[in-house]
Amino acid sequence: MRGVMRIFRLSGIGYIILFCLILSIDAFGQSVNSPCQVYGIVNYKGHPVPDGCVVKASIRGYEYASTKVKEGKYSLSIPADNPSTPEKDGWEKDEYITLQVIDYSGATLFKAPPDNPRIDINLNTMGVLNPTTTWGKIKALFK
């Protein structure tokens, strides 16, 4: 221990190393590198939506992730933004994310917590947006 302290006292390199260590620790504490893991159940009028319904995650109108519902459940991973690139790659700290079930009305807005980006969100849809598509599928079954 005395040898390490002597290096710090005698050389400017010790101070530079210490400074770099402090900066790297601070940078890791503030960066958001983990994807936001969102999961839960999807209901329509208290019952699970059919398998294959699509749940999408968007930020400011741009879609960043989507998945299909299976057995009334969904799980998706929203990538984190890479601050070293000029384009937006995913979510950032203090940013709102919208979850929406395609062909159903209603959406859920949430802010991903930066310290633990794993969230259980249950989606309850309000109604079917495109009944003609559903009716067309039903008619096709009887042809």
Image (tube, rainbow, N blue to C red):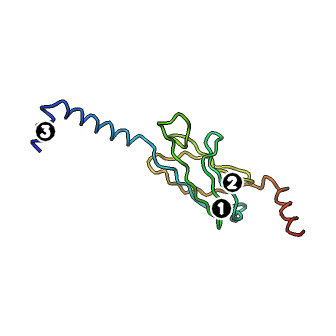
Packing grade of label 3 (10 A; few <14, some 14-19, many >=20) is: few
Q: Earlier in the sequence, mark 2 or mark 3?
A: 3
Q: Quadrant of residue 139?
A: bottom right
Q: Amino acid at mark 3?
A: Met
Q: Residue at x 11, y 37 (%)?
A: 6
Q: Is residue 35 above or below residue 24?
A: below
Q: Amino acid at mark 1?
A: Val
Residue 54, x across and y down, in percent:
68, 56
Residue 50, x across and y down, in percent:
71, 64
Question: What residue is disc 1 on?
Answer: 69
- In the image, is 84 to the left or to the right of 143? left
- In the image, is 57 to the left or to the right of 139? left
Q: Residue at x 73, y 61 (%)?
A: 45
Q: Amino acid at mark 2?
A: Val
Q: Residue at x 66, y 40 (%)?
A: 61
The answer to whether the residues at label 1 and label 2 have Cβ atoms under 8 Å apart is yes
Q: Residue furthest bottom?
A: 142
Depth check, front residue: 11 or 63:
11
Give the label on residue 101, or none.
2
Q: Is residue 3 above or below residue 132?
A: above
Depth check, front residue: 114 or 70:
70
Q: Earlier in the sequence, mark 1 or mark 2?
A: 1
Question: What residue is disc 3 on?
Answer: 5
Residue 95, x across and y down, in percent:
54, 40
Q: Residue furthest top?
A: 12
